[in-house]
């Protein structure tokens, strides 16, 4: 069974999470420098079947755009262009970074580990993916 991949897209870094082949568990995959994202995805998709790409859509409380929304829209356009066979869905990413930091605290991570922004991005992608799976099961 193909996997689902989630993307927490950022200007500098992008967090990635993926389901297991049975789509039961979401796990952090990696955090990658954003300029390397599409190269990484091409390699990953050549090895692993993926049936859906989820990408976090940054919006304000009133659903207006944030400073990052145009970047994500451009990334979505490029995903459609480079991987036309894989559908792309947007998911609400409000508070996922905050939730990731809270999860790190609950896991007992030290302050220095919790300040690792790359890890926060990866956990945020995992949270988005887990929430999507819960809502669609």
Image (spheres, rainbow, N blue to C red):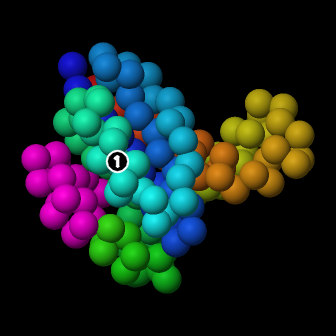
Quarter of the image where the N terminus is located:
top left
Residue 115 as seen in the image, left or right of residue 7: right
Quarter of the image where the C terminus is located:
top left
Which residue occupies 66% across, 46% down? Answer: 119
Asked if residue 83 is among those painted magenta in the image, a careful observer would answer: yes
Q: Is residue 124 visible?
A: no
In terms of depth relative to the viewer, which is nearer, 20 or 60? Answer: 20
Asked if residue 63 is among those painted magenta in the image, a careful observer would answer: no
Disc 1 packing (10 Å; few <14; some 14–19; many ≥20): some
Which residue occupies 18% across, 53% down? Answer: 83
Disc 1 secondary structure class: helix
Residue 60 as seen in the image, left or right of residue 91: right
User: Residue 39 placed where, x, y %?
Assistant: 36, 54
Image quarter of residue 82: bottom left
Q: Dot 1 corresponds to which residue?
A: 41
Task: Write down the region rendered in magenta.
Answer: 76-90
In terms of depth relative to the viewer, which is nearer, 130 or 76? Answer: 76
User: Residue 30 placed where, x, y %?
Assistant: 54, 42
Residue 4 as seen in the image, left or right of residue 130: left
Image quarter of residue 36: bottom left
User: Residue 100 placed where, x, y %?
Assistant: 64, 46
């Amino acid at each position: 069974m193909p996997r689902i991949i989630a993307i927490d897209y950022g200007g500098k870094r992008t967090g990635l999470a993926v389901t297991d082949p049975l789509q039961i568990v979401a796990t952090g995959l990696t955090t990658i420098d954003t300029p390397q994202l599409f190269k990484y995805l091409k390699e990953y998709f050549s090895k692993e079947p993926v049936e859906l790409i989820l990408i976090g859509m940054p919006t304000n409380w009133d659903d207006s755009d944030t400073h990052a929304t145009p970047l994500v829209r451009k990334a979505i356009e490029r995903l459609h262009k480079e991987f036309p066979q894989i559908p792309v869905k947007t998911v609400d990413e409000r508070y996922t970074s905050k939730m990731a930091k809270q999860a790190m605290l609950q896991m007992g991570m030290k302050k220095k580990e919790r300040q690792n922004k790359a890890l926060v991005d990866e956990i945020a992608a995992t949270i988005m993916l887990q929430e999507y799976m819960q809502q669609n099961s």
